[in-house]
Image (spheres, rainbow, N blue to C red):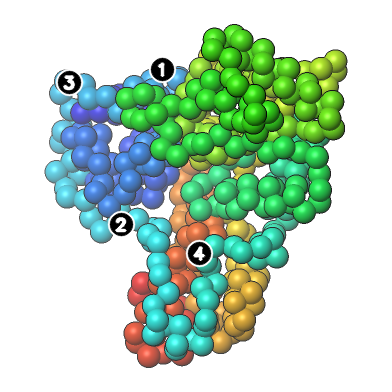
């Protein structure tokens, strides 16, 4: 069985609470805990990240969280529980759909010439709720005036869109800010799973952005001294520097600790570099106040979380997206369909003994569900997406 089962018992959380938090059936969780069988329909790495967040919120210590998915050769407790012998039911099917494509016959049926949820082409394509506007402005002010910021959000919440918007906004306003974005493709938090992003790689990216013609020094100490000098010269020329790291949840702990030292590069009282980390909820686990290894980083880093779209604003969001595509929303979906989407991407849950609703109303998930519903409506030959169409997806 997985050590995770012992950890749940240690923090006093039942398996049912974990199942509700992950929107999975208790049978599926039982198979996972007792036999190490991960749901085939879900990405195991993402699921592990969500479990780590649950353990952190439940008060588990960092050492247990790190070893939660190890197998232990101990007899399974509660073997009389009938749920252990059940096959995963249909209840554990993922609530979120994979990437959907608008079919040609769907475009024709609805009179659409572009995908309303396709990649944004300009800043005017961005829909800004009060929450998104706050995160957007927080990032912009950090880039302009300095600071250490972590932007955390689920996959599809719009984090990369805000990063692109930041770069575009800096360019359009003519701000003297150099955005430095290290290459993070396929980066992982340890060398077993993939290539880690180390502080030396970040320093190389900073040198390439600030002093592209300079030849890097051979030793690490000399390279960092060279970087400090280049940053001072760039600052004297009137520039500010903002280090933006995407996929920051994959940063190894040593690199997180080194970011504090990069933040401390200064001339007089002026910090030479501001830092914005962008990552999924696993980043919150690494930045836990209980993690002694990164305590100095946590004390200096401000965090902001991208929230799902408020259900009451779902219609506003959809209207904006279809307006940008040149289509009236009421010609695509009716009020019952919008309500069904809100209900489909929300699920009741219990946390700490109280009822609450877990929302997955993020732009990517909404877009995939609406496109799937449009494709189904076109196949059925119905002119509008209704609640019944959404339920049929």
Q: Which badge, 1 or 3, comes first in the chain's sequence?
A: 1
Count of numbered tags? 4
Please indicate whether residue 24 sits to the left or right of residue 122 in the image. Answer: left
Label 3 vs 4, first from the N-terminus: 3
Sequence-wise first label, 3 or 2: 3
Figure quadrant of residue 152: top right
Q: Which mark is residue 379?
A: none
Residue 362 in percent (x, y) is at 54, 57
The answer to whether residue 353 is visible is no
Q: Which residue is mark 2?
A: 93
Q: Identify the secondary structure beneath mark 1.
A: helix
Residue at numbered disc 3: 74
Q: Which residue, given by chain and number where applicable, does mark 1 sit on?
A: 63
The Cα–Cα distance between marks 1 and 3, rounded to whole angstroms, is 20 Å
How far apart in space, not on screen, are marks 3 and 2 (Cα)? 30 Å
Residue at disc 4, secondary structure: helix
| Residue that label 4 marks | 366
Question: Dot 2: what SS?
Answer: loop
Compared to 40, does 261 lie above or below?
above
| For marks 4 and 2 on the same chain, the one whose residue lies earlier in the sequence | 2
Few, some or many C-alpha atoms within 10 Å of disc 2 (few <14, some 14-19, many ≥20)?
some
* Residue under the point 79% across and 23% down: 233
């Amino acid at each position: 069985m997985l050590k995770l089962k012992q950890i749940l018992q240690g923090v006093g959380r039942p398996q049912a609470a974990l199942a509700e938090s992950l929107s999975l059936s208790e049978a599926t969780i039982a198979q996972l805990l007792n036999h190490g069988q991960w749901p085939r329909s879900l990405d195991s790495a993402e699921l592990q990240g969500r479990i780590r967040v649950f353990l952190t919120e439940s008060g588990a210590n960092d050492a247990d969280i790190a070893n939660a998915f190890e197998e232990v050769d101990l007899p399974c407790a509660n073997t009389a529980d009938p749920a252990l012998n059940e096959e995963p039911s249909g209840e554990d099917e993922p609530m979120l759909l994979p990437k959907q494509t608008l079919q040609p016959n769907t475009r024709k049926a609805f009179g659409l010439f572009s995908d309303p949820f396709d990649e944004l082409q300009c800043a005017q394509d961005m829909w800004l709720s009060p929450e998104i506007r706050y995160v957007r402005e927080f990032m912009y002010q950090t880039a302009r005036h300095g600071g250490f910021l972590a932007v955390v959000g689920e996959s599809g919440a719009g984090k990369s869109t805000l990063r692109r918007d930041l770069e575009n906004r800096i360019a359009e306003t003519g701000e003297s800010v150099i955005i430095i974005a290290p290459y993070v493709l396929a980066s992982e938090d340890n060398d077993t799973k993939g290539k880690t992003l180390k502080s030396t790689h970040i320093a190389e990216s900073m040198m390439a952005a600030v002093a592209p013609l300079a030849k890097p020094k051979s030793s690490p100490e000399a390279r960092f001294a060279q970087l400090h000098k280049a940053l001072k010269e760039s600052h004297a020329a009137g520039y500010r520097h903002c280090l933006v790291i995407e996929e920051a949840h994959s940063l190894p702990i040593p690199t997180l600790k080194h970011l504090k030292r990069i933040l401390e590069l200064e001339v007089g009282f002026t910090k030479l570099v501001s830092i914005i980390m962008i990552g999924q909820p696993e980043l919150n686990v690494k930045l836990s106040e209980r993690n002694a290894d990164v305590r100095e980083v946590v004390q200096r880093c401000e965090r902001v979380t991208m929230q799902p779209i408020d259900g009451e604003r779902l219609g506003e969001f959809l209207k904006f997206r279809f307006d940008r595509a040149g289509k009236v929303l009421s010609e695509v979906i009716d009020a019952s369909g919008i309500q069904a989407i809100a209900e489909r991407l929300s699920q009741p849950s219990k946390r700490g003994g109280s009822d609450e609703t877990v929302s997955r109303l993020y732009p990517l998930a909404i877009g995939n569900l609406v496109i799937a519903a449009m494709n189904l409506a076109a196949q059925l030959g119905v002119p509008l997406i209704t609640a019944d169409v959404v339920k049929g997806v």
